[in-house]
Image: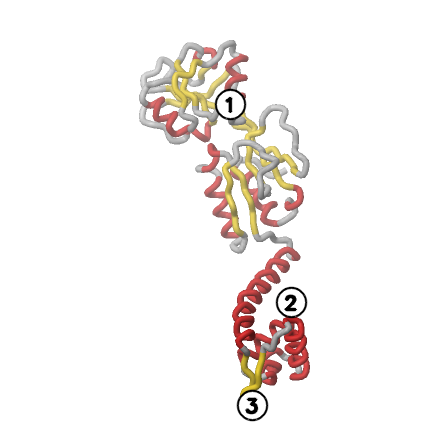
Amino acid sequence: MDVQRLRAFRSVVATGSVRAAAEALGYSSSAVSQQVSALQRAVGLPLLQHVGRGVEPTAAGVALAERIDGFLAEVGHLDDFVGSLRNGHSSTLNLGYVASLAATWLPTIVGSLTAEFPETAIHLRHADGFDAAARPRLDVQILIEPAGFVEPDGYRLVPVAREPYVVTLPPGHRLADAQEVALAELADEPWIDNELGNAWCRPIVADACAAAGFQPRYRLGVHDYAPALTLVGAGLGVSLMPGVAARAVPAGVSIHPVVQPTPVRAISALVLRSTSSTPVVQRTVELIHRAGGTPRP
């Protein structure tokens, strides 16, 4: 269906005459009449009928006019969307995040984006690892980069920060007064697991413990940092976690840097190349760098 014909017909229905519709649209009466006649031929049904000195829609015309309103509204939205594309803006942003950074990074990042890009719909997705089959594809994904990670086709990997792990100790622990804790000193401790079995962070702790000459003895596993801290606070074991995850701990729980070796996780942003030049994506990457305490390269 020709949009101009639909607009002309809808205006005639609304005003009750071809002449009034022409004045409203800024066309000549003959041009509006030709548009309506062409629409009737395309539809194959009479859409208008003469009544006195004006016109009114037939039953088919009434039904079509009702549908046209919604259609023209969508056309208007589409025009706005195309205009935003011309201006380098995107109507949506698909942003992936890891759970451990949700409470600390996301509020600031998303708050800034919604203020600066009020017409952009932001869709958040929890994603601990990269999934090439996931749809819609993420424009930006904050991820923990595992050792040997290869930049996927169609994406650009942007290093953001390197975050050391800390150990959380229960109240009254023998190492509670230590400035730092050598990893080997925890070899005989009961451990509390705080990672999912397939989480990309899991090898970080496992590899560090192996380098220190032991495997951790996990007494309990809760697969989340907050409940792990609660169990540490109850005196049930020790737990290693990224520093950002140990900002709010139960009373009596102590937090210590880990050395010999220090487990470190690499935080990166995975950026979809096809949308990487849009202002909202570029700004998202800048805000991620700011959250990580590093200037954008």
Crowd tier of the residue under label 2, counting other residues whose Cα lies within 10 Å: few below 14, some 14–19, many 20 or above: few
Residue 278: x and y, percent?
A: 63, 49
Side of 266 relative to 166 (left or right): right
Q: Is residue 232 left or right of residue 74?
A: left
* Residue at mark 3: 53
Residue 116 position, x and y percent, is 53, 52
Q: Is residue 217 left or right of residue 134?
A: left
CA separation in Å, label 2 and label 3: 29 Å
**Which residue is at a point 66% across and 57% down the rendered structure image?**
86
Give the mark toward the camera: 3 or 1: 3
Question: Alpha carbon of mark 1 to alpha carbon of mark 2: how far?
Answer: 57 Å
Query: Separation of disc 3 and disc 1 at Cα?
Result: 80 Å
CB atoms of marks 3 and 1 within 8 Å: no
The N terminus, quarter of image: bottom right
Identified at 47% across, 11% down, the residue is 184
Q: Is residue 164 above or below residue 38?
A: above
Q: Which mark is residue 1?
A: 2
The residue lying furthest to the bottom in this view is 52
Which residue is tagged 1? 202
Q: Earlier in the sequence, mark 2 or mark 3?
A: 2
